[in-house]
Amino acid sequence: MSFLLKLAEAMKSRDSIVCVGLDPEPDRIPGELGGGPQAALRFLRRIVRATSDHVCCYKPNLAFFERYGPAGIDLLVLTLQTIPNDIPVILDAKRGDVPNTAAAYAEALFTRLKADAATVAPYVGLDAVEPFCERGYVLLLARTSNPGAGDMQDLRVEDGRPVYEHIVERAVARFPADRLGFVVGATYPEEARRLRAIAPDRMFLMPGVGSQGGDVATAIRSALDANAGGVLPSASRSVLYASGGSDYELAAERAVKELKEQANAARTVHV
């Protein structure tokens, strides 16, 4: 089943367009769970259990697993096994390299780890994006949510437009909508609005709601497509670490339900 179809079914069955990032931070995992990768696994299993009725997608960030060293891959695999089969997974890897290396990355993410989608960096060139599109669904970095995003992405080229608009324009021309969408930070709604005009039929993964300060309603309304869809707001820390106490599971559930309600309200107003 394709990523977009699986995502659409999960959105419908859970009445949610919310994605939750799974980013284990050792110093924020409750001490009662122990330490090391085993504590992270216990924590993530309980977070998934607490939130899976209210999300349409999970997004593990590979860096937070790789920091555990060799045990990190086992931690990632066991975490993926925890996620219900009908919920798609985006592996947030931000890979980007020359084509033959990109093909190896793509095989690792889609064939070995069985991701439904993956984040990819575009700056090596679109020929380096192609191996990922051949094996799965790509969410290409366009306008990211971090404060320094403009250092490179806002550089003016050719006709005076920023480089990120050209990246989106060229990717849309080269890859079909069922193979490629974009990462568009929730912290930059005006940029999202312009990118929606360039990419009217693409899925936008919108990280940055919650701890990074993006307002979910503003972000969603700026990026909805003509069918009041096409957006996937994503939160990580504001859900996972909604409480540092023993009530972390209940707090995560409350946080994701609130985000789900806000996101649905924003879509309803748009309609």
Image (cartoon, helix red, strand yellow):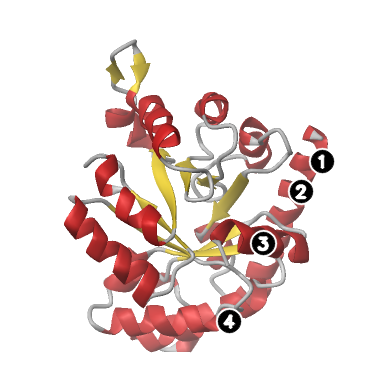
Which residue position holds label 2? Answer: 264
Q: Which residue is mark 4?
A: 46
* Distance from Cα at disc 1 to Cα at disc 3: 18 Å
Q: Which mark is residue 268?
A: 1
> Could you classify mark 3 by the number of other residues whose Cα lies within 10 Å: few (under 14), some (14-19), or many (20 or more)?
many
Report the Cα–Cα distance between label 1 and label 2: 6 Å
| Sooner in the amino-acid sequence: mark 1 or mark 3 | 3
Q: Secondary structure at mark 1?
A: helix
* Residue in the image at 39% along x and 68% along y: 110
Q: Earlier in the sequence, mark 2 or mark 4?
A: 4
Q: Is residue 35 left or right of residue 18?
A: left
Give the CA separation, mark 1 to mark 4.
31 Å
Image coordinates of residue 22 in percent, x first then y, are: 48, 67
Q: Nearer the viewer, mark 2 or mark 4?
A: 2
Which quadrant does the N terminus fall into? Answer: bottom right
How far apart in space, not on screen, are marks 2 and 4 (Cα)?
A: 25 Å
Q: Is residue 259 above or below residue 70?
A: above
Q: Amino acid at mark 3?
A: Val
* Disc 1 to disc 2: CB gap under 8 Å: yes
Q: Secondary structure at mark 3?
A: helix
Q: CA distance from mark 4 to mark 3?
A: 14 Å
- Circle nearer the N terminus (1, 4): 4
The structure residue drawn at horizontal position 66% and vertical position 35%, both measured from the top left corner, is 225
- Residues 151 and 34: in front is 151
Task: Say which amino acid is labelled 2.
Answer: Asn
The residue mark sitting in front, 2 or 3, is 2
For mark 4, does the 10 Å Cα neighbourhood hold few (<14), some (14 to 19), or many (20 or more) residues? some
Splitting the image into 4 quarters, where does residue 220 fall? top right
Labels 1 & 4 near each other (Cβ < 8 A): no
Amino acid type assigned to the residue bearing label 1 in the image: Thr
**Secondary structure category for the residue under label 2:** helix
Q: Which residue is mark 3?
A: 256
